[in-house]
Image (cartoon, rainbow, N blue to C red):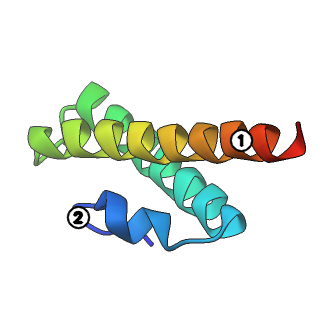
Amino acid sequence: MADKNLKVDELRQLSDDQLSDTLLTLKKEQFNLRFQDATGQLQSTARVREVRRAVARVKTLQNQRKADAKKTEA
C-alpha cells in the first residue's frame, strides 16, 4: 500500500501487520529515492518529503497503539 498521500484515517483502519508492511514498503521507497538523488536521477524531490512524513505517521500510530496496549494491561 504505497499510496501517494497516506491519510491518518486510512492508516488507523489497518491492522498491526498491515501497518508493518506499509512501513517496510515506505522504507524501501525512501531508500530508492535517496539512491536516485545520489545518482542524479531523482525526478520528484517533493516525494522524498511525502515519504518521510508518511513513515513518521505510521511510526506514530504504531507507538500510540503500543501505549494503548500497555494502558489496558495495567
Which x, y percent locates residue 20? 65, 56
Horizontal side of residue 45 vs 25, given as left or right: left
Q: The residue under label 1 is which amino acid type?
A: Lys
Placement of 13 over or under 8, stated as above or below = below
| In the foreground, 28 or 40 | 28
| Quadrant into which the C terminus falls | top right
Identify the residue under disc 1. 66
What's the mark number on residue 30? none
Which x, y percent locates residue 26? 46, 51
| Residue drawn at x 71%, y 66% as measured from the top left | 17
Cα–Cα span, label 1 and label 2: 26 Å
What's the mark number on residue 4? 2
Badge nearest the viewer, 1 or 2: 1
Image quarter of residue 2: bottom left
Image quarter of residue 42: top left
Q: The residue under label 2 is which amino acid type?
A: Lys
Which x, y percent locates residue 25? 52, 58
Horizontal side of residue 40 vs 57, given as left or right: left
Question: How many numbered marks are there?
Answer: 2
| Quadrant into which the N terminus falls | bottom left
